[in-house]
Image: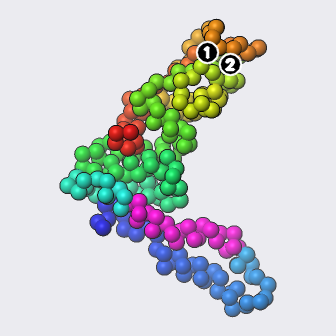
């Protein structure tokens, strides 16, 4: 397989194994005796060391998947400024995590001659700041607008007490103040334009003592659309 990342091997499994073996050498020689301080120390980091040893195989599988999903005639060597941080992040990402998919889709852009212009280096750090719920919100905003009603004491009150009247498809998040929190964070990342209007009384929604109703909405910014275009799979 051609090394499209231009990085070679990110993890030297022989080196990791040697570190692991050297760290436990004293304990092996003194079997049956009290564990040495070195052994006790390494025991705290056994799992991370084992992860390092398997990271190379995991990255190889990810790279092969990316290569297979980009037409061969369009494949180019990825820019290290994009590929290096992506692969470093992918070392410990769960396969089923939607954030993993965003990294892989961005990596596909980076090795695709026709889409390489969409692979902005800043996108890597942005993905690393997202939660899985925020990734799903961005996916929804790709073709939809989110509207909701927030219960605040006043417009400038940063605390949202409750949320109602939202058209977001996740029924739990649609009625949670976390939806407002996620939208605020996405706005901070310049991915979403999040507007909260003046207070009003909406007769079809319940009143909560001490709080007023504010209609809010969220759409993708131009930068957010470019981000979603690069980090979402084609046709999603």
Q: Residues within 10 Å of mark 1 (few under 14, many from 20)?
A: many
Report the residue at 59% width, 19% height from top: 165
User: Mark 2: which secondary structure?
Assistant: strand
Membership of 48 in magenta stretch: yes
Side of 188 where 4 appears, left or right:
left
Q: Are marks 1 and 2 in contact (CB under 8 Å)?
A: yes
Q: Position of residue 146 (x, y in %)?
A: 50, 24
- Residues 28 and 64: in front is 64
Q: Position of residue 17 (x, y in %)?
A: 54, 79
User: Mark 1: which secondary structure?
Assistant: strand
Decide: is 47 above or below 73.
Answer: below
Task: Name the disc covering residue 229, or none.
Answer: none
Magenta region, residue range: 41-63
For residue 34, what is the image quadrant?
Answer: bottom right
Report which residue position mark 2 lands on: 152
- Residues 220 and 173: in front is 173
Magenta stretch, overall SS? helix
Report the residue at 46% width, 64% height from top: 58
Task: Name the disc covering residue 214, or none.
Answer: 1
| Residue situated furthest right in the rendering | 34
Distance in Å between CA atoms under marks 1 and 2: 7 Å
Report the residue at 64% width, 23% height from top: 163
Membership of 154 in magenta stretch: no
- Residues 10 and 139: in front is 139
Q: Residues within 10 Å of mark 2 (few under 14, many from 20)?
A: many
């Amino acid at each position: 397989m051609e090394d499209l990342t231009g990085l070679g091997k990110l993890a030297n499994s022989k080196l990791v194994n040697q570190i692991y073996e050297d760290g436990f050498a004293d304990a092996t020689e003194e079997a049956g005796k009290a564990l040495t301080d070195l052994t006790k120390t390494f025991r705290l980091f056994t799992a991370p060391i084992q992860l390092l040893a398997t990271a190379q195989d995991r990255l190889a599988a990810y790279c092969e998947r990316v290569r297979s999903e980009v037409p061969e005639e369009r494949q180019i060597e990825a820019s290290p400024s994009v590929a290096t941080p992506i692969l470093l992040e992918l070392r410990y990402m769960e396969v089923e995590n939607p954030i993993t998919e965003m990294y892989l889709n961005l990596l596909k852009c980076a090795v695709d001659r026709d889409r390489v212009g969409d692979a902005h280096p800043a996108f890597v750090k942005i993905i690393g700041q997202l939660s899985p719920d925020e990734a799903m919100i961005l996916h929804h905003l790709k073709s939809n607008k989110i509207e909701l009603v927030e219960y605040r004491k006043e417009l400038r009150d940063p605390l949202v007490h409750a949320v109602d009247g939202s058209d977001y498809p996740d029924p739990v998040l649609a009625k949670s103040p976390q939806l407002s929190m996620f939208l605020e964070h996405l706005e901070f990342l310049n991915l979403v334009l999040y507007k909260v209007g003046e207070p009003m009384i909406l007769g079809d929604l319940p009143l909560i003592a001490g709080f007023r109703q504010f209609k809010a909405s969220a759409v993708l910014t131009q930068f957010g659309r470019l981000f979603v275009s690069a980090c979402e799979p084609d046709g999603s």
